[in-house]
Amino acid sequence: MKVIKAIYNFLVGDMIILVGILLVVLLLAIIANVAALSPLRVISGPILIIAVLSVLTATLLREARANR
């Protein structure tokens, strides 16, 4: 169990990052596979960049405001 936790902390480091990135990937998969959302394929790159930056900013702000 310690090995799994160590790998998780090394790769992800925070649950907010993991869940946020998974939601972004899910959203982009839906955009790519649903025909009604095909006009959004053009802006899928900027959606990815903005969403990842938002997730990382949220994590950073949470860490900065934490009482230690």
Image: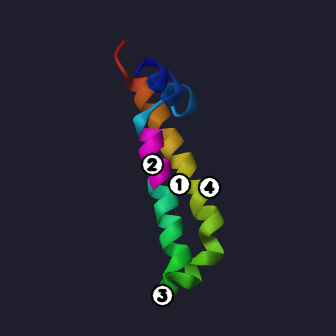
State the separation of the CA atoms marked 4 and 2.
12 Å
How is the protein colored in the picture? rainbow
Compare marks 3 and 2 and give the one earlier in the sequence: 2
Q: Is residue 65 above or below residue 23?
A: above
The segment highlighted magenta reads 16-22
Q: Are marks 1 and 4 in contact (CB under 8 Å)?
A: yes
The residue located at (47%, 65%) in the rendering is 27
- The residues tagged by marks 1 and 3 sit, at their Cα atoms, a distance apart of 21 Å
Residue at x-position 57% and y-position 55%? 50
Q: Quadrant of the C terminus?
A: top left
Q: For mark 1, give the secondary structure.
A: helix
Whole-percent x, y for residue 47 in the image: 57, 63
The correct choice, above or below, for 1 with respect to 47 in the image is above
Amino acid on which the number 3 mark rests in the picture: Ala
Kindly check if marks 1 and 2 are in contact, taking CB atoms under 8 A apart as contact.
yes
Task: Give the residue pinned by disc 4.
Answer: 49
Which residue is label 1 attached to?
A: 51
The amino acid type of the residue labelled 1 equals Ala
